[in-house]
């Protein structure tokens, strides 16, 4: 299959691109490099000893999109491209709706014109908001608490309406929880620009001395130790989930809309993750408790049983693997891909 991967130079996109290429698919990556680097793709290319077809462009630019779909005939699309920081979305909601929702609409219109009707959409557990019950099943109410989650929920609704209007569409909305870790080679990993929004990159940057201290946002949540609890999933497991979803859709005799959680089913608090990382590297992590971050919830972890039932997929890597692979990536690349720029 020839697969278009939007946002394929990013964290999850690069790991998924690698696994697609390893199994023999043809991949074209389309990325605006807003929060990513071509070095990630160069390293993917080195890992598989094959060149990667990369097109720099933005989903907001309809001319660039039209040119892309005129140049290549794709069989399916894996759609990662989008802004993803919860706090930033609260401060800049219009930017998030413009980029995430409008960009996806542009992509869908070009796919429809080209009669390409298989899509894997990178959704998020943030669509659940503050869950009423744990673990979270796919039947839980969709009540996002921030513009980032709202943008994902809006796109899911658009995709649902699209499938209702045309039964030829095969779409999987993958609601995944908190990606962490890196490729076991330590060659590709998470490289946020500026101050990290996610826990593990911040922890690992403190460990390397790049940052002085980790900020823990709130210790007064209704959780065992007062800090937020999340379902952390290894990025390699997550990438494999995308391949499993592609295979599932390819075997459907008619149109299908699949909405499914990708998580481990186990929640860890911020302090538990810090402790696990300290154990991995053999030294303490400096942190301080600060006020809660707008848009955050107390606890959120998945019921991943539907993914195992339908996709024959289950997360295989635990917290130790997540910490070891994160540390290998960060210690080998203390300044991320910027070391080579």
Image (spheres, rainbow, N blue to C red):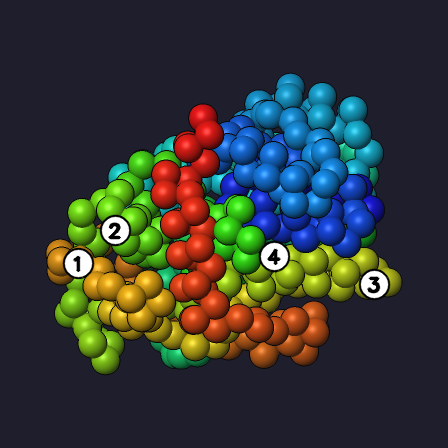
Residue wearing tag 1 = 287
Measure the alpha-carbon separation of dots 4 and 1.
31 Å
Left or right of 224? Residue 299 is right
Left or right of 88? Residue 21 is right
Among the two numbered marks 3 and 1 on one chain, the one whose residue lies closer to the N terminus: 3
Position of residue 20 measured from the top left corner of the image (x, y, whole percent): 71, 50
Q: Are marks 1 and 2 in contact (CB under 8 Å)?
A: yes
Measure the alpha-carbon separation of dots 2 and 4.
27 Å
Among the two numbered marks 3 and 2 on one chain, the one whose residue lies closer to the N terminus: 2
> Which label was assigned to residue 206?
2
Q: Are marks 3 and 2 in contact (CB under 8 Å)?
A: no
Among the two numbered marks 1 and 2 on one chain, the one whose residue lies closer to the N terminus: 2
Residue wearing tag 3 = 251
Position of residue 234 measured from the top left corner of the image (x, y, whole percent): 50, 63
Identified at 63% across, 42% down, the residue is: 44
Measure the alpha-carbon separation of dots 3 and 4.
19 Å
Identified at 45% across, 26% down, the residue is: 341
Classify mark 2: helix, strand or loop.
Answer: helix
Residue wearing tag 4 = 239
Residue 181 to residue 39: above or below: below
Tell which residue pokes out farthest to the right in this image: 253
Position of residue 154 measured from the top left corner of the image (x, y, whole percent): 50, 49
Measure the alpha-carbon separation of dots 3 and 1.
48 Å
Q: Residues within 10 Å of mark 4 (few under 14, many from 20)?
A: many
Q: Residues within 10 Å of mark 1 (few under 14, many from 20)?
A: some
Identified at 71% across, 26% down, the residue is: 68
Nearest the camera: 82 or 114? 82
Is residue 86 visible to the viewer in this orientation of the structure?
Answer: no
Nearest the camera: 36 or 153? 36
């Amino acid at each position: 299959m020839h697969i278009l991967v939007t946002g394929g130079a990013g964290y999850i996109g690069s790991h998924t691109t690698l696994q697609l290429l390893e199994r023999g698919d043809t991949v074209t990556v389309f990325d605006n490099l807003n929060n990513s680097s071509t070095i990630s793709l160069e390293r993917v290319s080195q890992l598989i000893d094959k060149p990667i077809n990369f097109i720099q462009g933005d989903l907001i630019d309809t001319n660039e999109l039209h040119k892309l779909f005129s140049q290549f005939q794709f069989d399916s699309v894996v759609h990662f491209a989008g802004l993803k920081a919860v706090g930033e979305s609260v401060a800049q909601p219009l930017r998030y709706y413009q980029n995430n929702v409008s960009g996806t609409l542009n992509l869908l219109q070009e796919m429809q014109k080209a009669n390409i009707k298989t899509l894997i959409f990178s959704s998020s557990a943030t669509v659940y908001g503050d869950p009423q019950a744990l673990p979270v099943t796919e039947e839980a109410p969709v009540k996002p608490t921030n513009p980032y989650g709202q943008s994902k929920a809006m796109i899911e609704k658009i995709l649902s309406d699209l499938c209702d209007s045309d039964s030829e569409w095969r779409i999987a909305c993958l609601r995944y929880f908190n990606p962490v870790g890196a490729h076991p080679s330590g060659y590709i990993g998470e490289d946020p620009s500026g101050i990290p929004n996610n826990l593990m990159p911040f922890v690992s940057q403190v460990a390397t001395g790049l940052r002085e201290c980790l900020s823990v946002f709130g210790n007064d949540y209704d959780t065992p130790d007062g800090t937020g609890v999340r379902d952390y999933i290894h990025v390699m497991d997550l990438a494999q989930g995308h391949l499993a979803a592609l295979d599932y859709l390819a075997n459907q005799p008619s149109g299908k809309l699949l909405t499914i959680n990708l998580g481990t089913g186990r929640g860890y608090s911020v302090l538990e993750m810090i402790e696990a990382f300290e154990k991995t590297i053999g030294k303490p992590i400096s942190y301080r408790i600060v006020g809660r971050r707008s848009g955050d919830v107390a606890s959120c972890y998945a019921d991943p049983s539907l993914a195992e039932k339908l996709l024959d997929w289950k997360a295989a890597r635990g917290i130790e693997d997540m910490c070891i692979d994160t540390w290998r990536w960060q210690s080998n690349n203390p300044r991320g891909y910027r070391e080579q720029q």
